[in-house]
Amino acid sequence: MDATFIIINLVVFFALLVGVFFMQKKHIKFSYRVLIALGIGLVFGGIIQLLYGADSYVTTQTTGWMGLIGNGFIRLLRMIVIPLIFVSILSAFAKLEVREKFLKSAVKAISILLITVAISAVIGITTAIAFNLDASSINLGEAENARSLDIESTASEIEGLTLPEQITQLIPANPFLDFTGQRGASTIAVVIFTALLGYSLLKFKKHDEVRANKLSEGILILNDFVMELVKIILRLTPYGILAIMANTVATSDFRALVDLSLFVVASYVALIAMFIVHLIIIALTGLNPFTYVKKTAEVLLFAFTSRSSAGALPLNIQTQTTRLGVPSSIANFSASFGLSIGQNGCAGIYPSMLAIMVAPVAGVNVDLQFILTLIVVIVVTSLGIAGVGGGATFAAIIVLSTMNLPVALAAVLISVEPLIDMGRTALNVSDSMVAGTVTAKTDGTLDKDTYDNMSYDELTTSNI
């Protein structure tokens, strides 16, 4: 009988995927398709949960087969992270003409990313204290205990290293190894290696402009080629989101959600507060923050549903250039650097709140010295957080390890991770767009007419 129910569930799931396919054929906007797929996935997953329960054989088998779509989509997003970073940064250098312009813009963009992650850490700490969050009141179940073992295994590679040694780990010794993504610091290592290649290209232009321009043209062609691959993967977004949401809801432990509801609420209070800070920063540069919200809503929705800053990279760059009026080179820099530097949600708010939660368990007094140290540690360790699912956990491991707090307790929130991660990812993407917009505005290179123009076209993915 169970087999019959599984088959029925999968037939319904396949029918829902076909429905999403026909929405594409009807040329419904990309953002609408993603949002509708999200809603369908939530409802379908909820029905499975209600009919069979989260841990039943029927649910396990059904979600296992649906995982072919959802997990497959996530793996494809992971696949394009390194190629995206590589070609985006190199193409940004290929479009530059003046060295001083690069240095000024790059330093300013990175500074904005690091300053905002410091602010996000302050907000995370303040929110955790205000909500009186304490990990000692959370009971670890089987899933949490299993996750804690994985985290301890990962942490064993980090513990024992001083902070300077951890920073040194960010520097690539073997870029080919980092291109495989095998190290926790692989993302930032690729960023550093690619930036050095780009700087070499600028030096090459000074010595042999003709051949350097040929190389630049080849890089731009490679960028366009890789972006075609990205478009192919982005076309799968509604299908992947439907499967991911259905699996998440169908297998969620709602009792755990109730137990952790305070942390979920506190997390979104902090995330929203930091997004308001983004808008304040935009306003302080003389730009309309409401225009920013309207023009970035589509890419923020994609980031929210996909939980991948890297997957949102093409839309991020396109939004900055075609809607916000940011020059292409600055947009590429800020979006690419933002994948691994100063992520406000994953590297700022999450580890700061978790550290405040875990400190009482370890018998650590949360005083001013502890808070100031935590902020500094978060800013430094915010380098190298990969823009894909799991980046926040890696950031938490590094921060807790550096602060001599029990890293295994990073597993206490595994039950609500997907729910929180959606908001964190959207905030990460917003931060990189704020960095690009503010950099361009203060450099005097922002196209104000483009920024203010509200009759803009849909993003490229809307028509694919």
Image (spheres, rainbow, N blue to C red):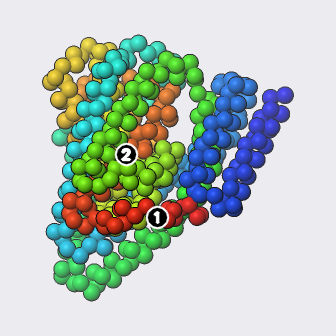
Residue pictured at 78% horizontal, 43% vertical: 11
Quadrant of the snapshot with the N terminus: top right
Q: Position of residue 323 (x, y in %)?
A: 40, 62
- Kindly indicate the quadrant of the structure image that contains residue 94: bottom left
Q: Position of residue 106 (x, y in %)?
A: 23, 60
Q: Is residue 112 left or right of residue 65?
A: left
Element marked by disc 1 = loop
Q: Position of residue 176 (x, y in %)?
A: 36, 59
Residue at mark 2: 428
Residue pictured at 35% horizontal, 32% vertical: 270
Q: Is residue 274 left or right of residue 61?
A: left
Compared with 405, 450 (above or below) is: below
Q: Assess disc 2: are there few (<14), some (14-19) or many (≥20) residues with their C-alpha within 10 Å of its C-alpha.
A: many
Compared with 153, 178 (above or below) is: below
Q: Position of residue 118 (x, y in %)?
A: 23, 39
Q: Tell which of 260 and 173 is nearer to you.
A: 260
Element marked by disc 2 = helix
Q: Which mark is residue 51?
A: none
Q: Assess disc 1: are there few (<14), some (14-19) or many (≥20) residues with their C-alpha within 10 Å of its C-alpha.
A: few
**Amino acid bearing label 1:** Tyr
Compared with 27, 165 (above or below) is: above
Residue 254 visible, this orientation: yes
**Amino acid bearing label 2:** Asn
Q: Which mark is residue 456?
A: 1
C-alpha gap between disc 2 and disc 1 = 24 Å
Between disc 2 and disc 1, whose residue precedes?
A: 2
Q: Tell which of 122 and 55 is nearer to you.
A: 122
Q: Tell which of 182 and 104 is nearer to you.
A: 104
Compared with 435, 5 (above or below) is: above
Residue pictured at 63% horizontal, 58% vertical: 28
